[in-house]
Image: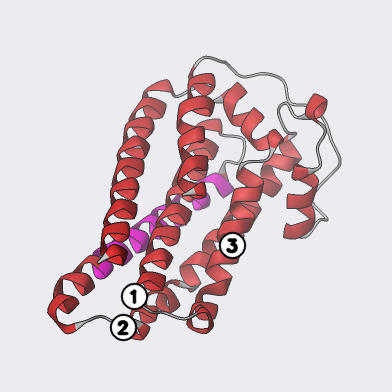
């Protein structure tokens, strides 16, 4: 639920700011090209509030590389996410409908991963593009929210902590993505510089629908667990 709340915060508060501002001049900061992924994320998180405006061009290039790396990890982990279904423990009367629901959730997740990978490939070619950064960031949030929902399903149907270790790399990639995406410099850059307002409005609609579906899923899971 915390992840859904974070995504709702992104829709309700960041996007309206995004649609109401034009581009501003980027602030210069330390060169992040020599940092590894964890060092770069920590650097983003440690940026003081008064310096958390628009990140430099070099940082935008490094951010694109970070997202590309995380997308590759998520893409490489899709098989393990799917295979996790084999560890489910489902009672016979409900087995068919439950497995159909799980397969549908995995299909949604896998599709989101592929869209995210495509997004970051475009961003890697044009790291200065604010619309591309916005699109990659929003779709990255969708990937990770869907992974959360899928993992919750697995836990509901008896998948153990040890079994979940098989998708640890995917979960860690999402954790690192969220740390970067929710950092003040990245949020500030998106809010100050996005220009494609029509695209932004369409993505808001999609995100709101995703949130509604995920909240319905959580309610369904509560009903199942209460039986």
Residue contact between numbered discs 2 and 1, judged by CB atoms under 8 Å = yes
Q: In this view, does 196 lie to the left or right of 58?
A: left
User: From this viewpoint, which residue is outermost toward the front?
Assistant: 227
Q: Main secondary structure of the magenta part?
A: helix
Q: Distance between the residues labelled 1 and 3?
A: 24 Å
Asked which colour scheme the image uses, the reply is secondary structure
| Earlier residue among tags 2 and 1 | 2
The span picked out in magenta is 102-124
**Which residue corresponds to the image point at 31% horizontal and 60% vertical from the top-left?**
221
| Earlier residue among tags 1 and 3 | 1
User: From this viewpoint, which residue is outermost toward the right?
Assistant: 30
| Residue denoted by label 1 | 157
| Residue denoted by label 3 | 173
Q: In which quarter of the image is residue 14?
A: top right
Residue 198 in picture, x, y percent from top left: 37, 23
Q: Quadrant of the C terminus?
A: bottom left
Residue 119 in picture, x, y percent from top left: 46, 48
Q: What element carries label 3?
A: helix
**Which residue corresponds to the image point at 73% horizontal and 41% vertical from the top-left?**
59
């Amino acid at each position: 639920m915390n992840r859904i709340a974070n995504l709702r915060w992104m829709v309700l508060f960041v996007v309206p700011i995004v649609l109401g501002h034009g581009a501003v001049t980027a602030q210069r900061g330390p060169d992040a090209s020599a940092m590894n992924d964890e060092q770069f994320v920590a650097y983003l998180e440690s940026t003081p509030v008064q310096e958390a405006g628009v990140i430099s061009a070099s940082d935008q290039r490094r951010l694109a590389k970070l997202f590309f790396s995380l997308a590759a990890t998520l893409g490489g982990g899709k098989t393990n996410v799917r295979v996790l279904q084999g560890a489910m423990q489902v009672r016979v009367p409900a087995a068919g409908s439950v497995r159909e629901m799980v397969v549908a959730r995995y299909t949604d997740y896998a599709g989101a991963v592929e869209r995210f990978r495509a997004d970051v490939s475009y961003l890697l070619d044009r790291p200065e593009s604010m619309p591309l950064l916005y699109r990659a960031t929003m779709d990255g949030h969708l990937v990770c929210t869907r992974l959360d929902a899928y993992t919750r399903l697995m836990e509901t149907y008896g998948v153990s902590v040890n079994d979940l270790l098989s998708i640890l790399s995917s979960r860690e990639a999402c954790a690192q993505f969220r740390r970067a995406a929710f950092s003040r410099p990245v949020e500030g850059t998106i809010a100050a510089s996005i220009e494609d307002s029509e695209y932004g409005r369409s993505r808001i609609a999609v995100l709101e629908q995703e949130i509604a579906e995920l909240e319905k899923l959580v309610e369904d899971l509560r009903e199942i667990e209460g039986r």
